[in-house]
């Protein structure tokens, strides 16, 4: 069991945050992207004495991983948040920043920040049908089939969003546990086939908030 009063939900936009308001959880809006997410998380966590449990929450695009591709409207819980673009891209392929000899942090595993195990297990128990796996954090969303396939293959991620790794990274630097929870709003790949369904994704987040209010 976890202390619900310690939970801090970090959402990029007001619409995503609104899904968690009324749940009794503390919610902040960071703004879109890694810099906004890291700064907002740092400001919210620094100085607190209750060792908060941070949830990076919002919508995401599913990456093409065959039969394990998350369905639109489903929830995804990240085993890790992976920086997808920190590194070097050459004609021979991608080399991560860690492989180049510049580790992101002492606690990073390559380009990934692992989810807090206790918080991860608590949330997985709250959402029995949740899909689990790495979630990629990107600055450039995958708007072509080729890029989506490359991100999925290179990171092992099942979904992508724009803030998770920064939230987990900042939280860990400040001694707080964190995890990424997303609902799938669309597919990645060629834009004309992404099949955006925002109402379904936001309804999934509202259901997740209701479940979190009971743990």
Image (tube, helix red, strand yellow):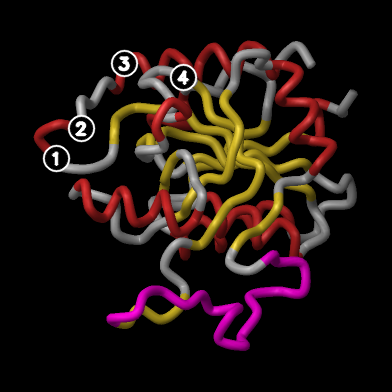
Q: Earlier in the sequence, mark 1 or mark 4?
A: 4
* CA distance separating discs 3 and 1: 18 Å
Query: Which numbered disc flags the more N-terminal residue, 4 or 2?
Result: 4
- Label ID, residue 153: none
Q: Earlier in the sequence, mark 2 or mark 3?
A: 2
Residue bearing mark 3: 199
Q: Quadrant of residue 77?
A: top right
Per the model, the C-alpha gap separating discs 1 and 4 is 20 Å
Residue 16 quadrant: top left
The residue pinned by badge 4 equals 74
Image point (81%, 41%), residue name: 117
> Is 128 drawn above or below residue 46 in the view shown?
above
Which residue sits at x=26%, y=20%?
Answer: 197
Instruction: Provide the residue span drawn in magenta.
Output: 91-109
Q: Which residue is mark 2?
A: 194
Up-down relation of residue 97 to residue 209 (above or below) = below
Residue with the mark numbered 1: 191
Res. 40 in view: no
Residues at marks 1 and 2 touching, judged by CB atoms closer than 8 Å: yes
Label 1 secondary element: helix
Q: Label 4 vs label 2: CA separation?
A: 15 Å
What residue is rendered at 79% in x and 30% in y? Answer: 121
Do the residues under discs 1 and 4 have CB atoms within 8 angstroms?
no
Local secondary structure at mark 4 = loop
In the image: residue 72, left or right of residue 180 = left
Question: What percent of the width, then of the height, locates residue 63?
Answer: 37, 40
Helix, strand or loop under label 2: loop
């Amino acid at each position: 069991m976890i202390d619900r009063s310690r939970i801090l939900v970090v959402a990029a936009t007001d619409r995503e945050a609104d899904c968690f308001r009324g749940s009794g959880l503390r919610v902040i809006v960071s703004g879109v992207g890694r810099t906004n997410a890291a700064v907002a998380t740092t400001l919210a966590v620094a100085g607190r004495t209750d060792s908060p449990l941070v949830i990076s929450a919002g919508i995401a695009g599913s990456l093409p991983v065959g039969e394990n591709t998350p369905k639109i409207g489903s929830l995804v819980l990240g085993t890790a948040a992976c920086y997808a673009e920190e590194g070097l891209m050459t004609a021979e392929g991608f080399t991560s920043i860690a492989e180049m000899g510049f580790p992101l942090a002492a606690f990073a595993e390559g380009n990934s920040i692992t989810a807090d195990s206790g918080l991860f297990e608590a949330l997985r128990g709250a959402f029995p049908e949740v899909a689990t796996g790495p979630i990629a954090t990107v600055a450039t969303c995958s708007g072509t089939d080729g890029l989506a396939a490359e991100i999925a293959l290179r990171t092992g991620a099942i979904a992508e969003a724009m803030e998770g790794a920064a939230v987990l990274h900042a939280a860990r630097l400040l001694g707080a546990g964190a995890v990424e929870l997303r609902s799938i709003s669309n597919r990645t790949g060629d834009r004309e086939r992404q099949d955006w369904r925002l109402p379904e994704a936001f309804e999934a987040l509202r259901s997740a908030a209701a479940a979190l209010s009971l743990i």
